[in-house]
Amino acid sequence: MVLSFVGKIQKGISHFVHKRHDFSEELVPEDVREGYFAVVAMKDGETKKFIIGLEYLSDPEFLGLLGQAQEEYGFIQEGAIAVPCRPQELQNILDGQRLL
């Protein structure tokens, strides 16, 4: 089940379009290098863009966020992937900090 979920995310990432009607173009820079993807953490009026390596697609907490994004926004997202969390929550996941 997790593998099919990751497969769908990877397929969606491979079809990135560097524009999203909800975000300004500056949130998805054209210089996102191969092996990385753009994620926008947004919740309660806080919004921040992150450039994340593909290795996070195996992190259980990050996959949990992607699951929440799929439930809230669906799999079809153009440009940056929006995740429903505060920027600091995503930063904690990226830093390897676990929230209690």
Image: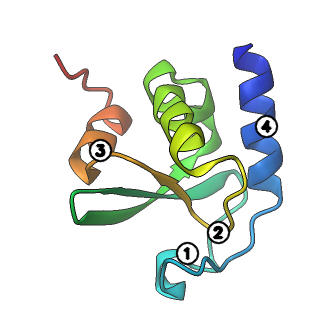
- Where residue 34 sits: x, y (%)? 73, 59
Within 10 angstroms of label 1, few (less than 14), some, or many (20 or more) residues?
Answer: many
52 and 61: which one is in front?
Answer: 61
For residue 28, which numbered disc appears in the image? Answer: 1
Which residue, given by chain and number where applicable, does mark 3 sit on? 91
What secondary structure is found at the residue carrying circle 2? loop
**In the picture shown, does residue 56 fall above or below 85?**
above
Residue 100 lies in quadrant: top left
Name the quarter where the N terminus is drawn: top right
Q: Are marks 2 and 1 in contact (CB under 8 Å)?
A: yes
- Where residue 51 sits: x, y (%)? 50, 58
Q: What amino acid type should be assigned to the residue bearing mark 2?
A: Gly
At a point 66% along the width and 64% down the height, the residue shown is 33
Which residue, given by chain and number where applicable, does mark 2 sit on? 79
Which residue, given by chain and number where applicable, does mark 4 sit on? 8
- Where residue 89 sits: x, y (%)? 26, 40
Mark closer to the observer (3, 2) = 2
